[in-house]
Each structure stands twice: as C-alpha cells, then as structure tokens.
Image (cartoon, helix red, strand yellow):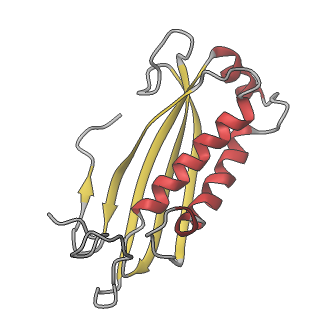
Amino acid sequence: MDLTHFDQDGNAWMVDVSDKDITSRTAVAEGFIAINDAIYERIAAGTMKKGDVLSVAQLAAIMGAKQTSNLIPLCHPLALTKVEVHCTLVDGESPACTDENHNKAVKVSAIVKTTGKTGVEMEALTAVQVGLLTVYDMCKAIDKGMIMGPTYLVEKEGGKSGHFVRSFVE
C-alpha cells in the first residue's frame, strides 16, 4: 500500500479529498495513564489541589479533538459533529500498569463523529492523548513517574476503507 501523504517524489502533502464521497464517519479511541495509590485516592476523593482531574481531562480532550488539524501538520480541518469523552478510574489490571508503584490507572475514551470526506481517527486519538497529558499535568506534583499508554484506535466506521474493529478487547 502506498503512503497517501507523499507525492511521487517523496514530498509531504495534504491528501486531495475533493473526489471522495461525503459519508458519516466515526472513530473510537482509548488510552491509559498508570498512577499510584495516592493519586488514585485523591482523584476519587476530589482532593487534588488543581481541581477535578477527570472533569478537566474530559474538557481538555474535547478541546484537543477540535484542534487536531492545528497540531498534526497534514490533517484536514474538520467540522466535528460529536466529541464524547469519558475519563474513568481503573482499580486493578490495565495495560498501563507495569509496576507495583503504578498499579491503578485513568482510562480516557473518545468517540468522534463527522459527516465529511475524511475520517476522524486522528481527532479521536488526539483527544485521548490530550486527556492523558492533562491527567499527568494535574498530578505530576505527587508523582512524576506516571506511565502513559497504550493509546489505540478501538473502532472506525465510514469511508472507503470501511469498518475497522481492534481485534483485542480490554
């Protein structure tokens, strides 16, 4: 498969979507940040000095989705019709928990929709990453060793490439 963001001479370019059909497009992404017990307890109790971590991360993620084309050089600016973000505490097994000091997590999930000529995968992934970075920013005074990842596309619908569903489930 040829890479679509390069011309025949290998120069980067923004893909021409002029001739693509306008279709309904949806993308779902999720990611994790591993946190320690102290951060988990303070987020759950709502006692973080910077405020409600999950609500601020949710809002930041929505804003991040809306700014994707300003952050990723070859992304088209899109009129998003829906950005839904959920930030939840995970007590126990998560893909981010890699050591005994970071045995809990925050999970950020994003659903992004549009009706247009190109998909919203990058917007969903950007939303998740911005949400995770916000959690890190709000909690770094307690622990700078938090671990972000994995972040991945869960599902996408619409467009020429059709329906994609990640083959593993968390």
Residue shown at the point (17%, 66%) measured from the top left: 2
Residue 88: percent from left, percent from top: 58, 37
| Front-most of residues 49 and 19 | 19
Residue 12: percent from left, percent from top: 35, 70
Corner quadrant of residue 93: top left
48 left or right of 159 in image: right
Q: Give the residue furthest to the front.
A: 9
User: How many labels, in total?
Assistant: 0
Q: Give the residue furthest to the bottom.
A: 19
Corner quadrant of residue 108: top right
Q: Give the residue furthest to the right.
A: 49
Residue 41: percent from left, percent from top: 70, 20
| Front-most of residues 146 and 28 | 146
Quadrant of the frame with the C terminus: top left
Quadrant of the frame with the N terminus: bottom left
Residue shown at the point (65%, 61%) measured from the top left: 63
Residue 109: percent from left, percent from top: 50, 47
Q: Give the residue furthest to the left.
A: 1
Vertical order, 64 against 146 (above or below): below
Residue shown at the point (70%, 37%) measured from the top left: 137
42 left or right of 169 in image: right
Vertical order, 72 against 133 (above or below): below
